[in-house]
Image (spheres, grey):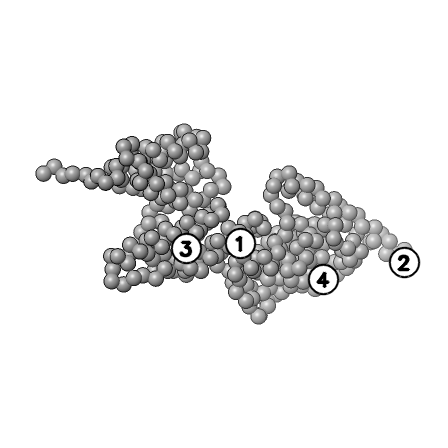
């Protein structure tokens, strides 16, 4: 029995250290406002309308830092899989002692996009991370998903991801343009973008005897409307002034501001007014120069004419 005491003490020390780190990380996450919670597989399944998992599982060595959630134990561990108060210390330490003696059985995970959710083996993952391992053997079952999920995806991000998944389901842009990556950072933005496509669909129908389907209109909108604006955004290099925002965010702001100004400004040039509004909204007047160049590049010069006027010819 004496031979077991050093191992038990070592496991106790590792567990206590892991529990303390979990406490510190929880406090820091509350201060920063950034969640360190594991993702719930059920929540991801519901928000992203995931397809049924593949039946076949295959054995892989997977990176531990890409395990971001759990099927049933997402409240027991934090994002680093450190044990919280609900975890039974004796069970955790028993797994630690077993891992110290021999390689444990592979865990079972679902792979969704680039990340993994533990179906069975949460304690083994927690112990492996506490021991400084980088990888772990796992039986992997793939679950198809339409939107990107990465190691930094938080529970709050799922609301936006849900909107993106619904947007792709209706437009099929991910199927017709696999290279697309239209990621927005504000709730409700995908509904606005869908409205833009529906308007584009309507005008396409007026120009043709064939009324296009929404996916057909979305593909045409992506090629003829969205990409030219995004290319202008990239060429202007204005996005570097807005950390945390995306090309799609700026596309939406520009197009919505343009429409509002065309309707609302009768005397002052819309481009100049857009610049002033933009500068005031972002408290950075120097960005006005960037946006002025961008808007002139993206939109024809005739758009600066007040509503209802047309350029007149010389004869």
The label nearer to you, 1 versus 3, is 1
Residue on which the image places disc 2? 1
The label nearer to you, 2 versus 3, is 3
C-beta proximity under 8 Å, tags 2 and 4: no
Q: Residue at x 76, y 50 (%)?
A: 15
Q: Which residue is drawn at 31% across and 40% down?
A: 263
- Percent coordinates x, y for residue 136 in the rendering: 65, 58
Q: Earlier in the sequence, mark 1 or mark 2?
A: 2
Q: Which of marks 2 and 4 is nearer the N terminus?
A: 2
State the quadrant of the N terminus.
bottom right
Q: Nearer the viewer, residue 94 or 23?
A: 23
- Percent coordinates x, y for residue 48 in the rendering: 52, 58
- Percent coordinates x, y for residue 29 in the rendering: 64, 42
Q: Is 53 on the left or on the right of 170, as rendered?
A: right
Query: Could you tell me if residue 196 is visible in this image?
Result: yes
Residue 132: assigned label: none
Residue on which the image places disc 1? 149
Residue on which the image places disc 3? 179
Q: How crowded is mark 3: few (under 14 residues within 10 Å), some or many (20 or more)?
A: few
Residue on which the image places disc 4? 104
Local secondary structure at mark 1: loop
What is the distance, in whole Å, between disc 2 and disc 3 at their CAs?
62 Å
What is the distance, in whole Å, between disc 4 and disc 3 at their CAs?
40 Å
Q: Residue at x 36, y 33 (%)?
A: 275
What is the distance, in whole Å, between disc 4 and disc 1 at their CAs?
28 Å
Q: Residue at x 33, y 47 (%)?
A: 228
Work out which residue is located at the far top of the displayed protein and give it: 285
Q: Is 139 on the left or on the right of 273, as rendered?
A: right
Q: Earlier in the sequence, mark 1 or mark 3?
A: 1
The label nearer to you, 4 versus 3, is 3
Q: How crowded is mark 4: few (under 14 residues within 10 Å), some or many (20 or more)?
A: some
């Amino acid at each position: 029995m004496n031979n077991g005491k050093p191992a038990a003490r070592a496991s106790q020390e590792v567990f206590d250290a892991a529990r303390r780190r979990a406490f510190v990380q929880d406090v820091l996450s509350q201060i920063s406002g950034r969640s360190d919670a594991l993702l719930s597989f059920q929540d991801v399944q519901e928000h992203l309308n995931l397809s049924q998992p593949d039946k076949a599982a295959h054995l892989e060595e997977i990176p531990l830092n890409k395990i971001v959630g759990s099927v049933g134990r997402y409240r027991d561990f934090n994002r680093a899989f450190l044990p919280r108060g609900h975890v039974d210390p004796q069970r955790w330490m028993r797994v630690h002692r077993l891992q110290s003696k021999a390689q444990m059985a592979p865990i079972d995970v679902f792979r969704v996009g680039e990340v993994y959710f533990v179906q069975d083996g949460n304690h083994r993952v927690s112990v492996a991370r506490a021991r400084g391992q980088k990888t772990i053997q796992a039986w992997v079952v793939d679950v198809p998903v339409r939107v990107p999920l990465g190691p930094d995806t938080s529970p709050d991000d799922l609301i936006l991801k849900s909107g993106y998944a619904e947007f792709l389901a209706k437009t099929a842009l991910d199927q017709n343009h696999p290279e697309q990556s239209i990621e927005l950072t504000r709730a409700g933005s995908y509904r606005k973008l869908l409205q833009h496509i529906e308007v584009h669909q309507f005008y396409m129908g007026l120009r043709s005897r064939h009324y296009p389907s929404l996916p057909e209109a979305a593909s045409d909108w992506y090629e003829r409307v969205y990409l030219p604006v995004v290319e202008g955004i990239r060429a202007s290099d204005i996005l570097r002034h807005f950390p945390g925002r995306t090309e799609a965010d700026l596309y939406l702001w520009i197009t919505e501001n343009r429409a509002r100004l065309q309707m609302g400004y009768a005397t002052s040039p819309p481009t100049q007014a857009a610049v002033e509004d933009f500068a005031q909204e972002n408290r950075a007047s120097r960005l006005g120069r960037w946006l002025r160049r961008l808007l002139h590049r993206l939109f024809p010069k005739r758009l600066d004419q007040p509503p209802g006027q047309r350029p007149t010819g010389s004869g």
